[in-house]
Amino acid sequence: MSVLAYGVVAWLFLYGVVTSRNLIHLVVCLSVAQSATDVLLLEIGYRSGGHAPVFVSLPVHPGPAVDALMQALALTDVVVGATVTALLLALAVQVHKRAGTLDPNELRATRD
Amino acid sequence: MSRRARLAFFAVAAAALAVTLGVGLAGLPSFGSQITAYAAMLNELAPRQRHVTDVVSAITFDYRGIDTLFEEFILLAAVAGISVLLRPLSDEVRELAEDKAPDRAIPPPSPAVWLLAVLLSSLLALTGLETITHGVLTPGGGFQAGVILASALYVIYLGTNYRTVERYQPDALLEASDGVGAFGYVFIGLLGLLAGEVFLSNVVGLGVTGNMIAGGTIALLNLTVGLEVAGGFAILASEFLDQTAVIRTGRR
């Protein structure tokens, strides 16, 4: 089952996001879980023996091409993921300045 | 929310998502057996219809160009958000008196590091320009090239003293490149309307397949996106470096 890799990685790291005790660690977990989506997209678009969807005339490609659409979606995902990671890290910097801690459990808004 | 409550909440949500996603994934064709009719059609049509050899570029900047427009604005919004979040706060100053003291000057990097930085950054700039201009031919394009171009600047940061770089770096140019890149995408989209077609239609001459200048608006959009991503990622890096190297908590 090829989507198993995605399932394991995504859920493992989403669990990491929920239980994290450090905001930097949390952002890294989110970033890995999100990268798992790229793997899933490329898996869906793969075709056995397929070549890259680049159609240069020489030399002539043998066999079919893989799904270019999924690669374009993965490209979008990578760019958006990088900017979201940067934005969350900027938030973590300011949280550390204001609250003096990176542990989400120590923050007043999340404490009981 | 306590830890237990959070875990319980996550368990319910994750299980629900797993079931929904599982049903969807179970309906997929088996791994590697076939690609969708839409993708096969695009692979077949894009080189003939848009005169490009890299179908991923054709999809990103033409067939699904409107998605990329929104993606570009996500990038712009994130960069603007980070600039606002990481601005010097009211109790922070950009430089303390002791930062300027001559006996506490940061030692300059060794000549070997400096030489390596110059070599690497020129190679990176060249690779970035190569990637951006060949976006319609080979894998690559504006997004990848923008990041490579910005990393040419990062290497300069590594090879010199950041405080010096910060003083001379063209902030206005980087910000302009970010904004012009984002607006340029909209402008090229409007060309379609001016030509009497729909927004973002490919109305520029398509050129010859296999040439560097081909694909009409695909090559132009590659350039604007490259400009925006390069400016945006350079701003990102300098905002984060400002936090550690320049901005100081002022004395109370």
Image: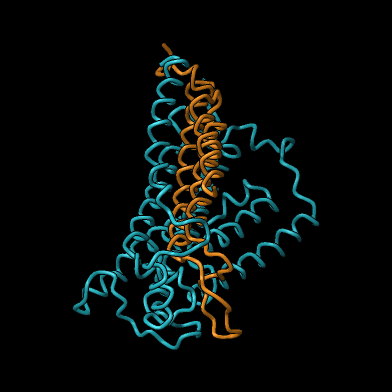
**Considering only vertical position in the picture, is B161 above or below B112?**
above
- Residue drawn at x 54%, y 85% as measured from the top left: A57
Report whether B26 appears left or right of B169.
Answer: left
Residue at image point 36% right, 67% down: B38
- Tell me the residue at 48%/75% (across/down): B136
Q: Nearer the viewer, residue B38 or B72?
A: B38
- Given residues B221 and A68, the one toward you in this image is A68
Task: Determine the colour of chain A.
Answer: orange
Q: Is residue A46 visible?
A: yes
Q: In the figure, B160 relative to B66: above or below?
A: above
Q: List x then y, in percent, for residue B113.
A: 77, 54
The image quadrant that residue B186 belongs to is bottom left
Check the image and name the residue furthest to the top.
A112
In front of the other: A106 or B17: B17
Quadrant (top left, top right, bottom left, bottom right) of the N terminus of chain B = top left
Q: How is the image coloured?
A: by chain
In the visual, does B198 lie left or right of A36? Answer: left
Q: Is residue A48 left or right of residue A108?
A: right
Eyeballing the image, is B88 above or below B32?
above
- x and y, in percent, of residue B226 in the image: 47, 65
User: In this orientation, which residue lies closer to the viewer: B202 or A68?
Assistant: A68
**Residue B207 placement (x, y as % from top left):** 41, 87
Q: Colour of chain B?
A: cyan
Coordinates of residue B94 in the picture (x, y in percent): 53, 37
